[in-house]
Every structure is written in C-alpha cells, then in structure tokens.
Image: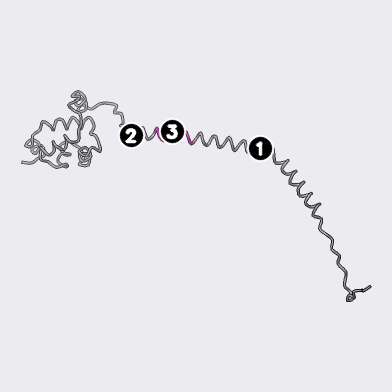
C-alpha cells in the first residue's frame, strides 16, 4: 500500500455534505406556519380594501355627477329677482324684441355709426356689440328693448344723441 506522506502538523479534512434536507424542511415549515398565521389578517385586509375601492368608485361617480351639474348651472343665465322696467317693455313687445345678429349689423350700418358709438347709445360695451353682431352672444331683455328703440331712430337723431352736430 502506498502511504501519502503529510507534513507534520497537518490535519486531514473530511467532507461532510450540508444538512440541506433538514434546513429546507425547517424553512418550508416556518413559511407554512407564517402563512397560516397571516391568512385571517390578510382576508380581513382584502375585504377592507375591496370596500374602500367600491367607496372610492362611488365617490368618483358622485364627483362626476356634481361636476356636470355645476357645468350645466354655469351655462344657464342667472335668474333676476325683479324685472327692470326696460325689460318689462321688451317682454311686452314679444316677437318685436326678438334678436337677430344681422339686424344689429344692418341697423348700425344704416345709422352710419361705429360699434363703439352703437355701444354708447345702448349703454353697453363695444365688446358686447361686437359679440352680438357676430352671434357669439345674445343681449339681455333690457338691451333688446334699447335696440328696439334704436330701430326707430334715424341717423340724425343718433348723432344728436351721441353729441355730434
């Protein structure tokens, strides 16, 4: 037999396989027990999350509904509590006080005045007259009555009222 000579003071190391089977079994058991312990807590949390999500969805629907109601309310003209006398006259005239953008343009051209002068005669802003003529806005009842009064006014009366000679 052959013997291997080793230097003095050396220890022979033998290989022992690690205890994988025990550690793996222990780890698996710990995981199983942890899951078993956490399962009831997780179920109650899942139920709570489901309830919260449904509440959030309901709140979102309510916000959407309220936003659309607000948008609709902004589109409607404000309701006046008391009708001014000029507006009463316009309402009494009925179809005569109906508004058409072309009529305002034609009337201003017939009077030979600018939008600014027309606005001065009507007690409105130049921007309002411009928006009425373009059809982007509609005059209120009081303005309709003033526009109707202006129809019967000739160019001389308009200039006189504006302060021109």
Q: From the image, which quarter does the N terminus lie in?
A: bottom right
For this orientation, the residue located farthest to the front is 1
| Among the 4 quarters of the image, the one containing residue 124 | top left
Q: Which numbered disc flags the more N-terminal residue, 3 or 1?
A: 1
- SS class, disc 3: helix
Pointer 3 with pointer 1, Cβ within 8 A: no
Residue 110 at x, y percent in the picture? 10, 37
For image coordinates 25% across by 36% down, the residue present is 137
Q: Please tell me how crowded label 1 is: few (under 14), some (14-19), or many (20+) other residues with Cα within 10 Å.
A: few
For this orientation, the residue located farthest to the right is 1
- SS class, disc 1: helix
Q: Which numbered disc flags the more N-terminal residue, 3 or 2?
A: 3
Residue 117 at x, y percent in the picture? 14, 41
Residue 90 at x, y percent in the picture? 20, 27
Q: From the image, which quarter does the C terminus lie in?
A: top left
For image coordinates 82% across by 59% down, the residue present is 17
Residue beneath disc 2: 75
> Magenta segment range?
60-69
For this orientation, the residue located farthest to the top is 92
Q: Which numbered disc flags the more N-terminal residue, 2 or 1?
A: 1
Pointer 2 with pointer 1, Cβ within 8 A: no
Instruction: For marks 2 and 1, give the one nearer the viewer.
Output: 1
Residue 70 at x, y percent in the picture? 39, 34
Residue 61 painted magenta: yes
Task: Give the main secondary structure of the magenta stretch.
Answer: helix
Q: Label 2 vs label 1: CA separation?
A: 48 Å
Q: Label 3 vs label 2: CA separation?
A: 16 Å
Q: Nearer the viewer, residue 155 or 61?
A: 61
Residue 108 vertical position relative to residue 12 in the rendered view, above or below: above
| Among the 4 quarters of the image, the one containing residue 87 | top left
Residue beneath disc 1: 43
Residue beneath disc 3: 65
């Amino acid at each position: 037999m052959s013997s291997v000579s080793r230097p003095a003071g050396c220890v022979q190391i033998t290989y022992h396989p690690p205890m994988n089977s025990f550690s793996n079994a222990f780890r698996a058991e710990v995981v199983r027990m942890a899951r078993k312990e956490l399962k009831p807590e997780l179920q109650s949390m899942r139920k709570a999350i489901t309830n919260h999500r449904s509440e959030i969805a309901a709140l979102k629907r309510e916000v959407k509904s309220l936003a659309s109601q607000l948008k609709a309310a902004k589109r409607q003209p404000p309701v006046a509590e008391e009708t001014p006398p000029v507006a009463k006259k316009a309402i009494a005239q009925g179809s005569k006080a109906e508004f058409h953008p072309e009529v305002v343009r034609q009337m201003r051209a017939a009077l030979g005045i600018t939008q600014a002068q027309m606005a001065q005669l009507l007690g409105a802003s130049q921007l309002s007259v411009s928006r009425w003529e373009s059809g982007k806005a509609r005059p209120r009842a009081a303005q309709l009555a003033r526009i109707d009064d202006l129809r019967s006014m000739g160019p001389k009366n308009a200039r006189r009222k504006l302060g021109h000679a």
